[in-house]
Image (tube, rainbow, N blue to C red):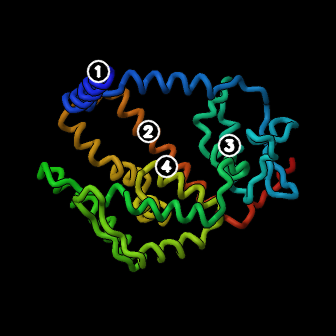
């Protein structure tokens, strides 16, 4: 009896998604965001934000307090440019600190605390493995209008990646996706090895947002704008919205959030790869 009820509930959810995919999960998503926001806010407790250079790198000062990570480590980043960007995040907070908007700070915390204890090789392998499930490599067989849309929008970025890295990627309509050649994976492994661990963390973050390593490398290499990459990653969703209609406050919010996270990830990668410091000129009256 219990298994029958579960099956009935599962079937009902599938029908709801099929009948109105644009509205499915709206209440759940809304409630989830509310709870997340409440858990990620705190009243601002500092007046001024500044940076200073320490033994391990550049540090963030909140008044006279040194910023610490969630694990209690000193918040110290490898480049002055990144420190300035993080300090700007803290300085831009108003009466309430909204931690969920501070993507650069979160990425730095993850790099410093390394809660999953992953090394550079593990980060590279995780990124390359995503090629096997890359969004732009999975194609539908119908409807024809979506097939043409995918071909027109996704084929050029795959073509760019194949030419840029001199590899074969391809696409597939099969449930298992395309078969990525071992040589292609080896090329990407060697390319990603040229980044430091912090930048690799940023690349992994971008991949997670776009569900695509190809789109992630496109924005990192400046072959795509963040806006274009986000739209390409949401191609099927936007197609469905065009047919079912748009719940503006939901889809627009998701679009802006995805764009903000992706942009932060790209900025993080470039700032972590920045080795020079910013020179300051002291102005005297």
* Residue under label 3: 88
Q: Residues within 10 Å of mark 4 (few under 14, many from 20)?
A: many
**Earlier residue among tags 1 and 4:** 1
Residue that mark 1 sits on: 5
In this rendered view, identify the residue nearer to me: 79 or 155: 155
Counting from the top left corner in percent of width and height, residue 34 is at: 51, 22
**Gap between marks 3 and 4 measured at Cα:** 18 Å
Within-10-Å neighbours for mark 1: few <14, some 14–19, many 20+: few
Between marks 2 and 3 in the image, the one whose residue lies nearer the viewer: 2
Q: Earlier in the sequence, mark 3 or mark 4?
A: 3
The residue shown at (37%, 58%) is 134
Asked if the residue at tag 2 contacts the one at tag 1, i.e. Cβ–Cβ closer than 8 Å, the answer is no
Whether pointer 3 and pointer 4 mark residues with C-beta atoms closer than 8 Å, the reply is no
Query: Could you tell me which secondary element the residue under label 2 belongs to?
Result: helix
> Which residue occupies 62% across, 28% down?
40
From the viewer's perspective, is the residue at label 1 or at label 4 nearer?
A: 1
**Which mark is drawn over residue 256?**
2
- Mark 4 or mark 2, which has the lower sequence index? 2
Apparent side of residue 147 relative to residue 251 in the rendered image (left or right): left
| Distance CA(mark 1)–CA(mark 4) | 41 Å
Residue 192 seen by the camera = yes
State the image coordinates of residue 8 (x, y, percent, origin top left): 25, 24
Q: Quadrant of the N terminus?
A: top left
Q: Is residue 64 left or right of residue 28?
A: right
Q: Which residue is mark 4?
A: 262
Residue 277 placement (x, y as % from top left): 75, 62
Marked residue nearer the N-terminal end (3 or 1): 1
Cα–Cα span, label 4 and label 2: 10 Å
User: Is residue 165 depicted above or below 236 in this figure?
Assistant: below
- Image-quadrant location for residue 185: bottom left
């Amino acid at each position: 009896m219990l298994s029958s009820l579960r099956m009935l509930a599962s079937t009902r959810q599938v029908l709801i998604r099929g009948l109105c995919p644009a509205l499915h999960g709206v209440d759940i998503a809304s409630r989830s965001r509310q709870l997340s926001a409440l858990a990620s806010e705190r009243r601002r407790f500092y007046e001024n934000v500044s940076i200073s250079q320490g033994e391990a790198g550049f540090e963030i000062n909140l008044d006279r307090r040194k910023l610490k990570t969630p694990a209690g480590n000193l918040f110290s980043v490898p480049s002055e440019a990144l420190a300035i960007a993080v300090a700007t995040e803290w300085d831009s907070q108003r009466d309430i600190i909204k931690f969920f908007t501070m993507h650069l700070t979160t990425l730095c915390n993850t790099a410093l605390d390394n809660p999953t204890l992953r090394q550079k090789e593990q980060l590279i392998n995780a990124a390359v493995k995503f090629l096997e499930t890359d969004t732009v490599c999975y194609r539908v067989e119908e409807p024809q209008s979506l097939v043409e849309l995918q071909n027109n929008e996704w084929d050029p970025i795959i073509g760019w990646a194949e030419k840029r890295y001199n590899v074969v990627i391809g696409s597939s309509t099969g449930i298992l996706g395309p078969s990525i050649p071992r040589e292609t994976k080896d090329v990407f492994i060697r390319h990603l090895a040229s980044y430091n661990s912090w930048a690799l963390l940023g690349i992994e973050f971008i991949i997670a947002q776009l569900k695509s390593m190809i789109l992630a490398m496109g924005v990192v290499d400046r072959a795509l704008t963040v806006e274009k990459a986000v739209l390409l990653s949401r191609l099927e969703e936007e197609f469905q919205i065009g047919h079912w209609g748009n719940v503006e406050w939901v889809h627009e919010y998701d679009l802006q959030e995805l764009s903000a996270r992706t942009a932060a990830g790209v900025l993080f990668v470039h700032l972590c790869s920045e080795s020079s410091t910013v020179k300051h000129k002291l102005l005297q009256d």
